[in-house]
Amino acid sequence: MTKFRTKLLFALITLIIAVLIGLGLLLGQIFKNFYLDTFNSRIEKEARLLASSIEENGSPKEINPDMIQELSDILDVRITILDQAGNVVHDTEALESFVGPQQERIVKEIHKNWNVKHKHKKLVTSENEFRFYWYPLKDANDQMKGLLVMSAEVDALEKGTQQIWFVLSISLGLALVLIIILGSRITVRYTKPIESATNVAIELAKGNYRARTYEDRLDETSMLSTSINILARNLQEMVNAQDMQQNRLTTLIENMGSALLLIDHRGFVVLTNKTFRDFFSLKESQLKKVRYHEVIHYQEVNKLVEEIFMTEERLRKQILLPHKLDRKHYEVYGAPIIGNNDEWKGIVVVFHDITELKKLEQMRKDFVANVSHELKTPITSIKGFSETLLDGAMNDPETLKSFLDIILKESDRLQSLIKDLLELSKIEKQGFELAVEEVEVAGLIEDVMPILREKAKPKEISLQSDFESRGLAEVDSYRLKQVFINLISNAIVYTPKGGNVWITLQEDQDKVYVKVKDDGMGISPEELPRIFERFYRVDKARSRNSGGTGLGLAIVKHIIEAHEGDIEVESELNQGTTFTVSLNKQFLS
């Protein structure tokens, strides 16, 4: 814009200078022509008067030289009088003092052509310009008896021209300075808003929609600035709204739990989300200008996409796909994208992870099967022994007592199973609340130790406790005793005769840690992730014979989670197992 301003000012100054120079030339020429016309008219009149005076005084030779000299001084001209033959009779100046041979040549030409219409002639030398005027001298019979020649140096004309150019130069200089000052102000005044509007337009083109121009006048430039600012505000609002919508859409797509894939009508990948890239172990740089079958290496998915391309109909299919070291169930939903004018734009494919639903469904099936199996065994035993007694075995007192003992044992087992199921159902029920109070965790362990020592006596297992502190915490005493009874009872069950079980308690600023460690049979790494499942038994025969229902660790886990704590397990085969319970000192909920 500075270059434009300079060009505009330069053009204005050039135009003004050209106008002033043209005006000066025109005025100079007009003045010169006016001066020459006036001079010629004056000299002609003076020559005519002088010729009349000479004619009255006689022939050219009889004229008084003093009179001619006096007239020359008065008129400020050089007077030369020629006779009829063209010889110089009188001359107010020496002939050599004029211009020498040129003067003689001009005089001869004048004498030869004295009768021309315009009786004046010009002589220009290297130094000056001279004008010659003549008038014939006639006698009474109107016969030519001589020639009057008047000559003058046109120096006044040159002086006048010089004065004109001097005045024009001064005027041009002053006008130039004034034009530069005014032109600079005018160009700045009218080009600055344009420059500002141009800069704002450039910033808008770059994407900077916060740019604004000044609005300081009420004219056309202000209207331009106002329009530019309105445009900038509208663009900013539109871009902000678009960015907000884009951010919302991007956040929604990137953080949705299902994997999303968008394919255009040519089969190129257009859009994916983080879930999709994580599942297929892809980076965004790998998804530029690639077709869907180059990134999806599962034939089932590619067949689904191809079928949608061919049928242009929505499809839904459940597919089992490998994922790292595991396999996941997906419900793949694909739909064609059709534009307003039935224009085919592409396909959207959504992968819904239903692995957890499948697991829950399988857990429900396993639970029903396990409950049925666990109930079937004692019920079958009770029914079988009852039928045997009714068939006549009750008449034998020893057989009767033995069968009744078995029936009682199976009834107790059935009662324990139902009790644990009801307990687990109660804990898992929505709205389950703990009776929280501030107690010493070490005291709760000490309360259940006598019961557990009696259980450990038949196997001669040593129960050892080591409490570094009392572990004051906000817990549900009854539920936490259930946890310790279950964990220590399991340790006794799975520890061989003569083994050891250690119970330790530690605490830090925020938590209390209780560890139950045994030197029993241990748990294999494959079984560790499943020990908290319902009815899962590491050693099914031993736990069932010990009266276990397979629900103890499931109950323990739910109680600890209700306390917002953690339970961890470490184990090695034939080396023992360690359960670590972490409890918050302050109950957070």
Image: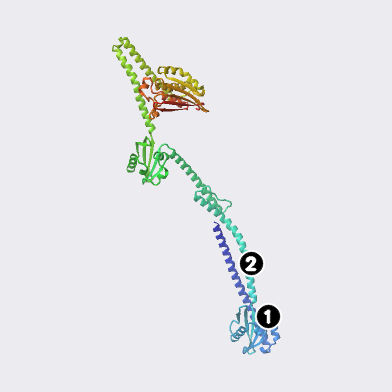
**Residue 569: assigned label:** none
In the image shown, does 506 or 254 lie closer to the viewer?
506
Tag 1: Cα neighbours inside 10 Å, few (<14), some, or many (≥20)? Answer: some
**Quadrant for the N terminus in the image:** bottom right
Q: Residue 225: x, y in percent?
A: 54, 51
Which residue shows up at 63% across the image and 72% down it?
162
Q: CA distance from mark 1 to mark 2?
A: 34 Å
Which residue shows up at 65% across the image and 75% down it?
156
Circle nearer the viewer, 1 or 2:
2
* Amino acid type assigned to the residue bearing label 1 in the image: Leu
User: Who comes first in sequence, dot 1 or dot 2?
Assistant: 1
Q: Considering the numbered disc 1 on the image, is that residue within a helix, a strand or a loop?
A: helix
Q: Residue 412: x, y in percent?
A: 38, 17
In the displayed image of the protein, which residue is found farthest to the left?
391
Q: Is 530 displayed left or right of 52 in the figure?
A: left
Task: Kindly identify which residue carries mark 2.
Answer: 170
Q: Considering the numbered disc 2 on the image, is that residue within a helix, a strand or a loop?
A: helix
Task: Kindly identify which residue carries mark 1.
Answer: 75
* Residue 492 in which image quadrant: top left
**Up/down of 294 relative to 320, above or below:** below
**Up/down of 525 relative to 447, above or below:** below
Q: Residue 24: x, y in percent?
A: 60, 69
Q: Residue 122: x, y in percent?
A: 60, 80
* Amino acid type assigned to the residue bearing label 2 in the image: Ile
* Residue 137 in which image quadrant: bottom right
